[in-house]
Amino acid sequence: MDDFTLWYSTPAVNWSQGLPLGNGRMGAVVMASPHREVWSMSEVTYWSGQTDPEPAFKGGKVTLEEMRRHFYAGNYDEGDRLAKQYLQPNKQNFGTNLGLCEVVIQFSEESPDHMEAGSFRRELDLNQALVRTVWRNNHTTLNREVFASHADDLVVSKVWSDASGGVSFTLGLEGGAESFQCAVLNDGTLEFKGQATENVHSNGKCGVWAQGYVKVVVSGGTVTGGNGKLTVAGADEAWIYFTVSTDYRRAEAAWRKESLLTLEKAVDKGYPLLRRDHIGDYSEQYDKVRIHLGTASKADLSTDQRIRMLARGGSDDPQLFAMFLQYGRYLTIAGSRANSPLPLHLQGIWNDGEACRMGWSCDYHLDINTQMNYYPTEITNLGDSHLPLARYIEDLAAAGRSTARNLYGSEGWVAHVFSNVWGFTLPGWDTSWGLNVTGGLWLATQLIEHYEYSQDLVFLEKTAYPVLKEAAAFYLDYMSVHPQYGWLVTGPSNSPENHFYPDHSGSTVHQLSMGTTLDQILVRELFEFCLKSVELLNRDEELGRKLKEAIAKLPPLQIGKKGQLQEWLEDYEEAQPEHRHMSHLFALYPGHQITPDRTPELGSAARVMMQNRMQQEELEDVEFTAALFGLGFARLRDGEMAYKHISHLISGLCFDNLLTYSKSGIAGAETNIFVIDGNFGGTAVIAEMLLQSYAGEIHLLPALPQAWSKGEVSGLRAKGNAEVDAVWENGELISATIRTFSPGVFTVCRGGLRTTLHAEAGVNYKFNAQLELLVP
């Protein structure tokens, strides 16, 4: 049995049991049963909403200074009132990503005389990115296979039987929007079109248009059309081709013809070549990392059985964690390729329809969710998948210039708590959660991650530095000096999406303050990176001088009266100690302003902060919180605690298809709702338990739990443009190999052992258990 195949012996009765496919733009969740198959189709640019004119704001720096005076004086009520008056926009046509349609395939069932029990299996093969379904009884076997091809830009399926003429089915399309239309063409093809409209996040009249085709080709038998459906009768084999295009940022003449041309090319190419090229294109990315944990394999058990076994406390299935890591890498490849038109949103590129109909939106949250989608991208050797996010950040920065100017009277650019595909950079429409003044900056730190892993000077010079330089210009212009402390601080802003008591527990609850810890961590990250870039690129000397002066005035990280890492500039009492957000842990991960070696007291304070959250009976237990706990403890090199939280994520916050969810009732969720950041956050946890790199150091097996006492991994990436392999037994390193692609100096660490590596580009360095360099 294969360790990297999700498989089930029971039908998928709903979306949360379906298996996801994707080609970086189009998504499909395949819900298979013996005689029926439904593909829930999505497309990442299929958005409602539009670009709205930015509302007129009055005040700028004058009103900003007025509200700051109130906050500095402790008059939070008046500061809040002014913030709502001057910094809170009305909701317009923000929009949301919507599901596209469902492909519904109904297979002919045998006569009652032949309806004896059969065997059923459906699976997602991560090695080849294929969904397969097999139905057997005493008379026949029906096989189905589906994949989403990035190489040829479509979704393709093959249906075949071991009985001559054994393939018969009807195929139809069901659309979600009122505008959805489907027509039968005379060549076994369905043509469909629709507009992404809805009334929760926009006015029901504006959105992206889509047009596409479904074509069925058969060998033997017939395919006919009528009543909006295609009918296949008595075929030996059938092939299904699905294509779609949208008018998002497209000229009408081009986009309407595109999907038909794609379809025609695919049919001419044929299924075998489409399949071969799909696997080849996918494997180039997927095969970069290999992982094996432990000795025993539970691959003979279905995936849902393995999840339940882990939930009951089972610890003898380490390969389930290896599969979860590879599943996260699979979802990254399926959802975000180098040429994807947009990055991963709240649900990746998939869409179960739940976030769209609620106060939530299937959008780009900038206060953890979108960032976490890309937390594992670099370390798991998928750096090209970061590029759609980099382009999106460039667009966000361009859009955010007017918000910086009109809202704050400042240079540069700014974005707040969330964004869409229409260039939204204003605060949210309630300052309590919407006035997160570093949301765009938080997202833009992913540019730093991509550069630090790749050492790509062209990317630094052309993409990362220009965007971050403008962000630095904003904060240098926007921040103010705290009259009591003399520190340079942001504000008014919130600590996403938390609340505090300014005076004492039980007093009036507030959200806005000056100099929240997250803001200050991110600004320091920004200023220090820009300063390094100034020196490396040998430019902007005056900016470098300003940055040095500003860095010296930034507040330090502080430890509160409970021994915790402080979340605000003042040691406020938390109004929601059970809160799901722990944004100030950025200093521990993905940042490195806190490390166990260099800042042990702050490391202890971060641990206390997490323990205080964990002890709350009403802890808001959601997917990204479990991942944040795991990441925090991994960085503190506490393998057992990291293992506890990644185990909980997999066994307690995953659907049967291993997609993560946010629990019903938290943050307004009306049901257990799919949010993909837990998959990516959990993938990052597992990778960080095996390898960490920051500040010129490479830590081998830094948070290895007892449950993974034996194993090997290859192809993980370290900052400085290197790849790392490691083999271990009985919890101890046996050997490690570091492949360096850029010259540099690394400190290689394992437990108390440390060695310095002066690396050249293009060399493999092998180390033994004592970190002694072995000469080849």
Image (tube, rainbow, N blue to C red):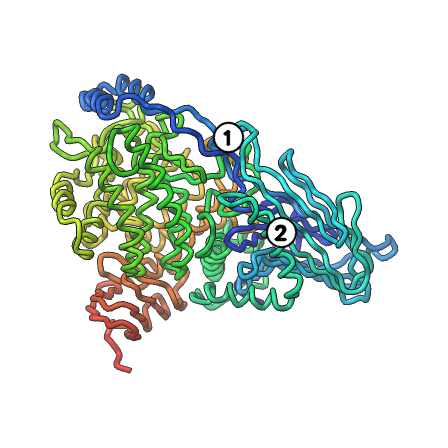
Where residue 485 appears, as percent x and y from the top left, is 12, 31
Place residue 192 in its image quadrant.
top right
The residue labelled by disc 2 is: 30
Disc 2: CA contacts within 10 A as few (<14), some (14-19) or many (>=20): many
Q: Quadrant of the N terminus?
A: bottom right
Crowd tier of the residue under label 1, counting other residues whose Cα lies within 10 Å: few below 14, some 14–19, many 20 or above: many
**Front residue of this view, candidates 117 and 660:** 660
Residue found farthest to the bottom: 776
Instruction: Report helix, strand or loop for mark 1.
Output: loop
Three-letter code, disc 1: His
Seen from this angle, which residue lies furthest right?
A: 113
Residue at position x 30%, y 42% in the image: 441
Q: Nearer the viewer, residue 219 or 432?
A: 219
Residue 732 as seen in the image, left or right of residue 244: left
Lower sequence index among marks 1 and 2 = 2
Residue projecting furthest to the front: 253
Badge 2 amino acid: Val
Contact flag, marks 1 and 2 (Cβ < 8 Å): no
Percent position (x, y) of residue 276? Answer: 58, 68
Residue under pointer 1: 201
Please tell me which residue is depicted at 26% across the width and 81% down the height of the picture: 775
Q: Quadrant of residue 443?
A: top left
Residue 157 makes an appearance in the image: yes
Q: Position of residue 729 (x, y in %)?
A: 37, 70
- Residue 619 in percent (x, y) is at 40, 36
